Amino acid sequence: MMNSAIANISLFDSLRARFAEISDSNPVLKPYIEKNFQNFLAKGFPTIKNEEWKYTDLQKILNRNYSLRSSSPTQSISPKAFLQNALHISFVNSAFNTDNLALSKNISIQPLSQTTQERLDKYFSIHQNALAQLNSAMAENALLITIKKNTHLQEPIIVTYTISPDSPCMVFPRLLVVMEENTSASFIESFSADGLHASLIVSSTEFYLQQNANLIHYLLQLDLQQSSHISHTAIFHEQKSNSSTTVFTGSGELVRNNLLIDLLSQYSETTLYGLYFGNKTSHIDNHTTVRHAVSNSLSNELYKGIINDEASAVFNGKIIVQPDAQKTNAFQSNKNILLSPNATVNAKPQLEIFANDVKCSHGATTGRLDEEALFYLRSRGIDKIQAQAILVKAFAHEIIENVHLPELQTYLAEHFQN
Amino acid sequence: MLVIDNIHARIGEKEILRGVTLEVKAGEVHAIMGPNGSGKSTLASVLAGREEYEITEGSILFNGKNIADMSPEDRAREGIFLAFQYPIEIPGVSTINFMKTAVNEVRKHRGLEPLDAPAFLQLMKEKMELVEISQSLLKRSLNEGFSGGEKKRNEIFQMAMLEPKLAILDETDSGLDIDALKIVANGVNKLRNKDNAIIVVTHYQRLLDYIVPDFVHVLYNGKIVKTGTKELALELEAKGYDWIKNEYNNVNA
């Protein structure tokens, strides 16, 4: 107790010192990030006494020494096979690299600090969430991507985040994407870390969808090694905009994903998929919030988890239907399979419905592999281990089959087979 | 081929088989009949190796090997096949894909090379015709959304693919209309030969019009209480099971 308190104090001192450097060197951003940093300091890191963090104890990973300064990468990055032909943006230890980008005039990519005052006012929100506040305060290299009006991108935009420091570090990558009217694009965000150090990534990604914007988003956490990742993804919907987001988690010591979908205007639709595979002592926590603010919007959510060994998982799915949001359709489902007697899942659907003319449903299941199905496969001559693998693959298939990029789908199917 | 000697089996604390003795030789078809709850399906499950059942006494020899402690997959590889009364639906697994794995596992056990894709496809086409099942059905998730008849045809298709020495058909006729029943029975008859054997577990006689048994056994209260030829099945159809129960209860009173 004593030790962790001391370690946290030294972490706060480091954060303060680093923040002072960042705000001094970014006079444009200073007023925006200052507020977020003060808000963060007022409450500090959330503890398990906070209902939203009941099952995810950050103390273990905060009680360590992290470097807060980006070092140059110690290893080069090789994009995965499915990345070919795509527009590739890479963050290495928090610093982004957009070299060699063959940009069309329909996309603009710029550091957030170089944008207009008006845009800063609009897109620099004051976050409620402590870790998002911290990210916003510390993200000296935030990047703003704008997909311009009437642009329909055929190839996906890949954003890779690689952590390869010379000592364990804490990094704060931040990405903002504005999709203007009548646009469509897909984004793949892929996080990876080298196996040398247990680092901590606190990331934030926000999408602002204007009228008739169509977003497909994938978040891949498949190569974190023993590093940890706390992510924030927020998608703000204007009228008749659609989003589909899928998170795949299969690595990392501790992963916490906060996903907020804000359906702010009518006739918007969103789909939320998640597939997580926990093994050894990993901990994977998905907190999602869908807020239906106005009438006639649709959300559909399906998260599936496979938990093995001593691993633990948390699913918390909040659906808020505000009083004006009549004719809302909101569906949520969470299914978990435990492969070991020591694996645990805490699943909690949370519906807060304040309108009366709505269709909402939710369900959460946690269980073992179906014994009958196992016996069926074994009775055909397939051994127990192979039969289990077939059933696990089948369980994951429901999420993977929705991936619209064939190369990515193949990559994921192979990844989750092992 | 199969020698069951005084098998006792229970599930939890409940004893269901109380001394079943039965011998099945290559080329034979045996029907196991009996009222509901007599232990018919348990016998089928015990032979296939369903792990909830515990064998407390007796032995099962299959081609000279004691299979009582063998895993279900090893029994399948040795040549035992169970056509399920209620075939399982498995979303996300197609019949074709899982059969490819199963066929090659069984081949490996028999010392044969795995089939490559064209050879597997060839074998599949042959067997599909036998049970009048379409490829599109086999590409779909296993049994998901299949009609009762389609599920049972899929069972017989799998039997055809795996070429077992002993096939156990557990209430294969249940839930089938007469046309579906004929197709399924036809498939089974085409698979009959002098080297394999079939055990037909059924409550009703009608399947036995199409798959004609050499022997009919009546299971009651966990034991075989009567054995006869196909005429016994007709007698049961006409008179029901009560006279069997009475006979048994009088003897054991």
Image (cartoon, coloured by chain):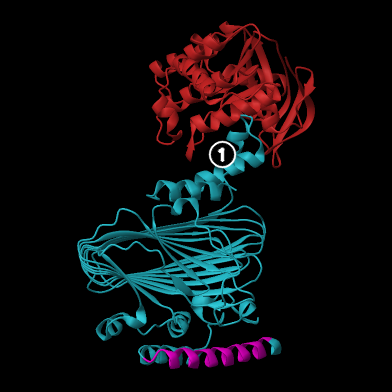
Chain colours: A cyan, B red
Left or right: residue B243 compared with residue B57: left
- Residue A203 image position (x, y, % from top left): 47, 74
x 58%, y 93%: residue: A13
Vertical comparison of A273 with A293: above or below: above
x 53%, y 84%: residue: A45
x 50%, y 12%: residue: B238
Left or right: residue A168 compared with residue B252: left
Q: Which residues are magenta?
A: A4-27
State the SS at label 1. Answer: helix
* Residue that mark 1 sits on: A373
- Residue A303 image position (x, y, % from top left): 45, 58
Q: Quadrant of the N terminus of chain B?
A: top right
- Chain for numbered disc 1: A
| Kind of residue at disc 1 | Ala
- Is residue A341 visible in the rendered structure shown here? yes
Splitting the image into 4 quarters, where does residue B36 fall? top right
Left or right: residue A145 compared with residue B195: left
Q: Nearer the viewer, residue A397 or A145?
A: A145
- Is residue B206 visible in the rendered structure shown here? no
- Residue B239 image position (x, y, % from top left): 52, 14
Q: Nearer the viewer, residue B81 or B182?
A: B81
Splitting the image into 4 quarters, where does residue A234 fall? bottom left
Q: Quadrant of the C terminus of chain B?
A: top right
